[in-house]
């Protein structure tokens, strides 16, 4: 029978009671002496080994060479044995000593006697391999097991190349063998995975629980593989426990679900089946701990209380009982406290805001406080959401308070070996893509490689960043990092989102490992404001933004979103006032409204495009969208070392942030508004018309049509267009600045490096050209253009080539023309007006009798017949918008 690989997605679910009644299996840390004697493995060469006692361990070490890393992305480690062996692969000696690795890098030999681990070359190495003997299976009849025989095995690895993949689904473990293809199976698996990822992985006790399951799983799988009846029985018990799974998955340590009598019976049956499956040394350990903790007496207890009392799951760090408020300028916290004494409010409201006197200062005049917790919920005292909202409303009415609001929750919005798969950097048109529909990384990199650039700090305000990966080594400023979730300086990623973002921005290029980041000069400040579930609150995010600005970040990446917050708006303004460019994800709802903070005026909002150079279907769009960047099927690093595809505006935003960082690297003196303007004005247009020629209509939530604002040069779906890094860095390299162009002007003016060729284009038509002079100024003479006409100013010098979008604005109305004296002998009316103005000569009845255009300098001469003395004429000038000036009255002289 083909073996189904085990991966532990939730510890001891078959013995589910263990999740709710912590037992400490006492996982053994690796002995330093033993690991120091690790045997070296070589690519393509097998070794043999043997162990005699259960729980005996052998260590191996893998140090891939530079050639192996450049040729292969992973190693395929294989262990073969007729005995039950656990195999674990670790990124480093430090991780091995702590027994810390990702579940996909643990396996066991069972059924077919073979274990295989596909491990990425994502760390600088050496990598460590632990092989552990588990002992032998108990006899089916319950008799005494034979003495353990010597466990012989072979071990070896081969380099292999794997392309990026989607986030991996877990393979078969005991629970999956029981629920596979069942009606409720997928729902149960999804909930259990959430419990594993968001609860058990966050505490030492939860991790120890997982470790015990590694030992028990091979024996449980072996029992279930050929026993359909047992699988069905387990499935029924898991269905019984599904409501419990649902609540714990949703609420974690805050779960108020009470264990029922049916739940307790199901837990007991699962526990008994697990005991029947494992060897004696594991059975005794499990029974001892279960008896000590009274495991079979859980009925009536809440899941949240069981989890937190036993430290199996971490308490939520999202503070829902807090209020944040801002004291008005020139006022103090004490002035608010004094006002409270005579403030008219209910007794409950006064009680709820009583902790204002203990408020914690966040920054400037921004404070937070926690409401008194006097309501008992789930065995703990708290304050209801209704009371928190009411307290904020009460406080906001005070004359010394500018605003107050409850804390809200926000969520994350997913020659190097993997470079060929990074279509945003170089789109070859594969997999349905459009060739060259990318950010033009390669020509930009060629240009910048010849320039001296400054290192630039880019803050990733997210779930943290895994700085141990080889591609991020030396790229992450861990000394500047901070964790606002755990309230410490360890900003390591425990979710994956932040690392994926950081990889897009700054993964080292040309080092052979994994992938290439867009910005070679970026240094990442990791600021953790989102927890392991990808959630964070207002206070954490606001403090993270301020922290990043204070630590010198030139760019902040915000791949997160939620509801509007004046607290966050205050923090965003704080950063913007420090000349920090903030890139924020537009949102993943596919709606015609930006999420917050993307909708803030202090950020550059970023939407997502796909391989076909179209706005991704999930990307939020509409009023206020600034720019778009690749965000669909984006490969980047995750903490387990693999290069993984993720999609979302979260993935588009770091491309824009990285590009902004490159412009600051070229010229640190640039203003954030100049950088944003440069990125937008050099973006590629990707708007398109519908196939049938009709115009797409948009509707609001009530079904009413939305009037799409017509902003010249800006598309409703993509903003100014899709990011073009080559054009942006070329514009900065050429120091290109284009002056405002009015509809009445006949020249495009600006500045650029001496000798830069400037060409002004209207579509494919060239309107004029010139070169920048020694004073860096240029002037390109053109015909006057209509208001709202979109022109492109092309600038070229050497390797630097750009195209800068210019929209013609309304010119000043033509002034009243200055008309020379007209005599009876004259056959023309002469004078001065605006350049290219249309001059009209009218009789006393205001009827036009002659007209002509002024030249580029505004000089005009309008032919007329000779007039009698005393004849009254009126002369007007009209600009390109056909608006006439006031009349100049002329009386013909002798």
Image (cartoon, rainbow, N blue to C red):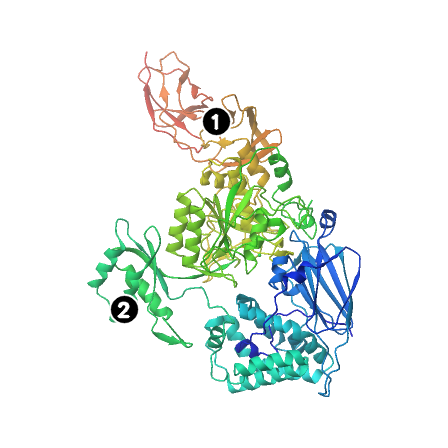
Query: At 46% across and 31% down in the image, what residue appears?
Result: 739
Would residue 562 appear left or right of 343 to someone viewing this image?
Answer: right
Q: Residue at x 53, y 34 (%)?
A: 732
Q: Residues within 10 Å of mark 2 (few under 14, many from 20)?
A: few
Q: Is residue 388 above or below residue 146?
A: above
- Identify the secondary structure beneath mark 1: loop
Residue 7 appears in the rendering: yes
Q: Position of residue 207 (x, y in %)?
A: 57, 68
Q: Which residue is mark 1?
A: 746
How packed is label 1: few (under 14 Cα within 10 Å), some, or many (20 or more)? some
Residue beneath disc 2: 351
Quadrant for residue 659, please give it: top right
Classify the position of the C terminus by image quarter. top left
Q: Closer to the observer: label 2 or label 1? A: 2
**In the rendering, at what x and y percent does residue 772 appear?**
53, 24
Residue 687 visible here: no
Give how far across and how far down residue 875 sits, in percent.
Answer: 37, 24
Q: Earlier in the sequence, mark 2 or mark 1?
A: 2
**Residue at position x 22%, y 59% in the image:** 339
- Nearer to me, 517 or 103: 103
Foreground of the two, 431 or 732: 732
Residue 302 is situated, as x and y percent measured from the top left of the image, at: 47, 79
Residue most toward the left?
Answer: 342
Quadrant location of the N terminus in the rendered image: bottom right
- Taking 475 as reference, is 80 left or right? right
Label 2: state its secondary structure.
helix
View extreme (front): residue:
33
Q: CA distance from mark 2 to mark 1?
A: 69 Å
Of residues 258 and 401, which is closer to you in this image? 258
């Amino acid at each position: 029978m083909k073996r189904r690989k085990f991966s532990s997605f939730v510890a001891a679910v078959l013995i589910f009671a263990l999740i709710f009644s912590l037992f400490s299996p006492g996982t053994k840390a690796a002995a330093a002496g033993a690991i120091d004697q690790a045997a070296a493995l070589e690519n393509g060469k097998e070794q043999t080994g043997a162990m005699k006692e259960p729980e005996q361990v052998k260590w191996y070490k893998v140090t891939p060479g530079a050639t192996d890393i450049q040729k292969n992305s992973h190693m395929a480690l294989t262990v073969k044995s007729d005995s039950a062996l656990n195999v674990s692969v670790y990124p480093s000696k430090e991780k091995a000593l702590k027994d810390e690795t990702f579940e996909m890098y643990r396996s066991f030999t069972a059924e077919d006697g073979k274990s295989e681990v596909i491990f990425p070359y994502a760390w600088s190495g050496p990598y460590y391999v632990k092989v552990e003997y588990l002992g032998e299976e108990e006899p089916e009849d319950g008799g005494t097991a034979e003495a353990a025989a010597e466990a012989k095995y072979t071990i070896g690895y081969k380099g292999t190349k794997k392309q990026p993949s989607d986030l991996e689904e877990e393979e078969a473990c005991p629970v999956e063998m029981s629920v596979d293809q069942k009606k409720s199976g997928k729902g149960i698996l999804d909930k259990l995975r959430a419990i594993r990822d968001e609860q058990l992985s966050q505490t030492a006790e939860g991790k120890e629980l997982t470790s015990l399951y590694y030992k028990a799983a091979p024996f449980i799988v072996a029992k279930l593989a050929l026993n359909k009846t047992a699988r069905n029985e387990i499935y029924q018990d898991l269905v019984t426990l599904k409501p419990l799974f649902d609540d714990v998955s949703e609420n974690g340590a805050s779960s108020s679900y009470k264990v029922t009598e049916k739940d307790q019976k199901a837990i007991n049956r699962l526990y008994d089946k697990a005991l029947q499956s494992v060897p004696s040394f594991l059975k005794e350990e499990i029974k001892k701990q279960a008896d000590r903790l009274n495991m079979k007496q859980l009925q009536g207890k809440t899941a949240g209380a069981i989890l937190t009392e036993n430290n199996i799951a971490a308490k939520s760090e999202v503070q829902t009982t807090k209020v944040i408020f801002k004291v008005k300028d020139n006022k103090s916290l004490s002035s608010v406290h004094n006002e409270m004494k005579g403030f008219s409010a209910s007794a409950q409201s006064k009680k709820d805001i009583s902790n204002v006197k203990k408020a914690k200062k966040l920054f400037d005049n921004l404070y937070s406080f926690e409401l008194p917790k006097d309501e008992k919920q789930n065995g703990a005292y708290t304050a209801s959401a209704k009371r928190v909202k009411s307290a904020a409303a009460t406080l906001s009415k005070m004359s010394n308070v500018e605003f107050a609001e409850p804390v809200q929750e926000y969520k994350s919005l997913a020659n190097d070996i993997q470079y060929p798969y990074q279509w945003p950097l170089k789109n070859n048109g594969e997999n349905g893509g459009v060739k060259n529909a990318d950010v033009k990384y390669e020509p930009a990199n060629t240009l910048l490689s010849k320039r001296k650039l400054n290192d630039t700090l880019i803050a990733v305000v997210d779930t943290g960043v895994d700085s141990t990966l080889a591609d991020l080594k030396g790229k992450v400023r861990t000394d500047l990092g901070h964790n606002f979730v755990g309230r410490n300086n360890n900003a390591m990623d425990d979710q994956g989102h932040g690392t994926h973002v950081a990889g897009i921005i700054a993964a080292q290029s040309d080092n052979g490992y994994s992938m290439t980041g867009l910005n070679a000069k970026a240094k990442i400040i990791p600021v953790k404001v989102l927890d392991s579930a990808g959630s964070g609150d207002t206070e954490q995010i606001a403090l993270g933004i301020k922290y990043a600005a204070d630590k010198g970040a030139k760019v902040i990446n915000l791949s997160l979103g939620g509801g509007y917050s004046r607290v966050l708006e205050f923090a965003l303004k704080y950063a913007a006032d420090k000349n920090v460019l903030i890139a924020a994800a537009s949102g993943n709802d596919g709606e015609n409204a930006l999420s917050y903070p993307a909708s803030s005026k202090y950020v550059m909002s970023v939407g997502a495009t796909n391989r076909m150079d179209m706005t991704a279907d999930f990307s939020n769009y509409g009023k206020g969208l600034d720019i778009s960047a690749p965000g669909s099927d984006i490969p980047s690093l995750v903490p387990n070392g693999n290069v993984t595809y993720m999609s979302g505006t979260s993935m588009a935003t770091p491309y824009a942030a990285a590009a902004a960082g490159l412009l600051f690297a070229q010229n640190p003196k640039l203003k954030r508004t100049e950088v944003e303007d440069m990125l937008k004005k050099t973006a590629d247009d990707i708007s398109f018309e519908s196939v049938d020629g009709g115009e797409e209509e948009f509707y609001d939530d009530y079904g009413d049509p939305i009037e799409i604002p017509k902003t010249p040069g800006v598309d409703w779906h993509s903003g100014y267009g899709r990011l073009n890094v080559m054009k942006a860095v070329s514009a900065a390299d050429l120091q290109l600045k284009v002056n405002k162009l009015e509809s009445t002007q006949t020249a495009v003016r600006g500045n650029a490096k001496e000798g830069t060729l400037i060409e002004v284009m209207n579509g494919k038509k060239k309107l004029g050209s010139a070169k920048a002079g020694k004073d860096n100024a240029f002037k390109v003479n053109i015909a006057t253009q209509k208001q709202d006409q979109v022109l492109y100013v092309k600038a070229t010098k050497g390797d630097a080539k750009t195209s800068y979008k210019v929209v013609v604005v309304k010119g000043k109305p033509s002034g009243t023309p200055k008309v020379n004296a007209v005599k009876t002998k004259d056959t023309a009316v002469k004078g001065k007006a605006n350049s290219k103005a249309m001059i009209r000569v009218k009789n006393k009845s205001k009827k036009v009798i002659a007209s002509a255009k002024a030249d580029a300098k505004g000089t005009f001469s309008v032919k007329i017949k000779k007039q009698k003395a005393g004849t009254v004429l009126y002369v007007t000038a009209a600009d390109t918008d056909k608006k006439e000036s006031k009349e100049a009255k002329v009386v013909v002289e002798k």
